[in-house]
Amino acid sequence: MTTEQLISTAILAPAPVSIPEQWQPEVEKKLSSGENVLSALEVDLDTRLRFGEGLVVVTNRRLMARGAGETTWNEWHFRDGLSLLHHDHAGVGHLELVDKQGRLAAWRFTLGKNLQAIRVVDQFREQLDSHLSGLPVKVAEQNTCPSCKAPLEPDEEECPICTKVLHTPPSTWTLFRLWRFARPYQWQLALGFFLMLASTAAHMIPPYLTMPLMDNVLIPYQNGQKIDNDLVILYMGGLFASAVLAWALGWGKTYVLALVSERVAADLRSTTYEHLLKLSLEFFGGKRTGDLMSRIGSGSDRISVFLSLHLLDFVSDVLMITMTGVILFSINPWLAVITLVPLPFIAWMIHVVRDRLRTGFEKIDRVWGEVTNVLADTIPGIRVVKAFAQEKREAVRFREANKHNLAVNDKLNRVWSLFSPTVSFLTELGLLVIWVFGIWQVSKGEITVGVLSAFIAYSTRFYGRLDSMSRIVSVTQKSASAAKRIFDILDHVSSVAEPANPVKLDKVEGRIDLREVGFRYGNRAVNRGVTLNIKAGEFVGLVGHSGSGKSTLVNLICRFYDVSEGAILLDGVDIRSFPVAEYRSNIGLVLQEPFLFFGTIAENIAYGKPNATRQQIIAAARAAHAHEFILRLPQGYDSMVGERGQGLSGGERQRISIARALLIDPRILIMDEATSSVDSETEKEIQKALDNLVQGRTTIAIAHRLSTLHRADRLVVMDRGVVVEQGSHDELMAREGAYFRLYEAQARNVDTDMDDKDGE
């Protein structure tokens, strides 16, 4: 390069960037003289989507990477055909390095690293273009998205990330993914296919017997010859035997394949539901209950019907058409060619209509999800609906959703209603052509009447099956749409991943350390740089205004979400190193809104420990001060609890919820506004129980009423996602800081309420 080019490159090239400290020694050893790191991505998932550490680096000369869980570095110098692709799916980001030969490498990461990945891809493309063109990289002032700060192209007005809507129309190939559920029943499927093949062959016999029946019996008789009774008995016996055989084989194949399809659908439902339970709360935050119920319920049922009926008919139709075509060509090739004339037109129509049906049926599924969403909202909340006299409003909302569903179906039916009769018309036209051509050949003496009769019989079956096959387009696209919506769930990877090398939890002391913990909901930072050390057995109260990040911090400790920055340690070990279920089994959680399942009170208390004895259940209820009111119920502990605890007061539901947490005897107890829904008298009873419960147990309590935390060993005050104060009640009051202002404001509200009552 010339001196001017070197100066230009030095001025225009991007400035080097810093990389994480733990990677600096390794990267510096890899860099050659004059080589600078321009962008870096710290990947945190390995190829099995388990947590690990890796680094992808773009320099001014090459791309270097060490994948998560790997010990060696790989490098690729910039060259023609090299490309770095970026996409995300099901909560996981992907980077793929490819060339003209195929994929060279791939890295995966959680979406918290997405912005870094975008910058790496952007820098890679700039450097690649620079090396291929021989021109220095120009540093232009680039527009960025105000929300996520992602780079925007000069002509882009909207951020492709923030406005990105993942919508992939369902493909028929999605149905082939069901094979993973059908594989365990492959021998039953093989038997069913054999029976189907034999049944189809049996159906081919009657038309073939009509040729000699016409030529050797009926036509000679019409010409004055005597009927050969032996031949009649032979042909009639053959027709009867073929009918019985076709019936028996048809029954067998239908029964076998129906059993298999039901089991495939049942396994699909179970697998989807089990996977759904493993997903993090982040997934459920953006989904409607009715939509998920529709996917697992009606979606799997639609797939079952498709596999047991429509797919069975389709395969039978294919076999019938294939066998019929072979027989027709063996009888008379020219007449067989005439039979196939309508086929190209029908195939063209299927191709045209298929795409419209595919997208249309997926839209119908989504709209039907809106209908079920109204039901899922209204029925559990019927008490609120009636309390506010909103029956008419909910009826209108359901009617509108139902009307939308009707409109979408009508639009699709306009396409389908034209398609099906047109196929029928083409098949009838095909039969007419066969009659005309066949009569002409009979008149020429090239075929007999028996051959023409057999041809008409076979052609009728051929076109009937063809018409049936055309109808499979509709149900196939419906099933593909249902399968796609189910696999959207199965493909979603939990953002709370299981560790690659889990650490066994032997004995939990209960020491919790938060180190520079940060968390983001999408692009919104909720917690930032939270550092907090909670001793084993300590009672810590979290206080602060609504939205200060208290509940989010508790969710992070429970590992309902994983931290975006920093780490949370239990007894000195990162909680992401423990198996999720094993870790959570040591935490007792009492939520602000107590949730009870339909069943008995005893079953609800023993939900976390199903094998608990009645004595253990009663002991937990006594500790939660629930035993007395339970005994006043008609069947005591065997009294049925309505859905979500209907029939019990808020305080009673909360005490059962507390008993449920106590029964598992957790080393860590978390109370998230546990006494917010109870009256003062009930709160006093719960507080008496809490005095004994917190002994020897790490307790974290969130409460709006600061008076309920006066027994806490330490109070932690949060504001806007950060810890602003911590100490005992007396220490914080003496500082006259954030806690003092909270306490004084709450005391003034209490005094105002008391004055109002005195005035009354």
Image: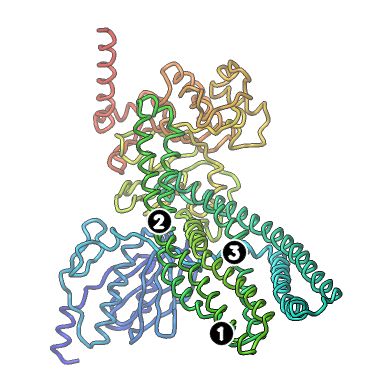
The residue at which mark 2 appears reads as 363
Q: Examine the rendered structure and indicate whether residue 467 appears above or below residue 589.
A: below
Mark before the other along the chain sequence, 2 or 3: 3
Which residue lies most toward the bottom here?
2
- Which structural element holds mark 1? helix
Marks 2 and 1 close (CB-CB < 8 Å): no
Label 2: few (<14), some (14–19) or many (≥20) C-alpha neighbours in 10 Å: some
The residue that appears at 48% across and 42% down in the rendered structure is 511
Q: Kindly identify the amino acid type of the residue bearing the numbered disc 2.
A: Lys
The residue at which mark 3 appears reads as 311
Q: Examine the rendered structure and indicate whether residue 303 appears above or below residue 589.
A: below
**Left or right position of 42 against 125:** right
In the rendering, at what x and y percent does residue 155 appear?
A: 18, 69
In the rendering, at what x and y percent does residue 223 appear?
A: 74, 80
In the rendering, at what x and y percent does residue 328 appear?
A: 64, 81
Instruction: Pick whichever, 36 or 266, lies toward us.
Output: 266
Which residue lies most toward the right here?
230
- Which structural element holds mark 2? helix
The residue that appears at 42% across and 44% down in the rendered structure is 371
Q: Is residue 491 visible?
A: no
- Name the disc covering residue 337, or none: 1
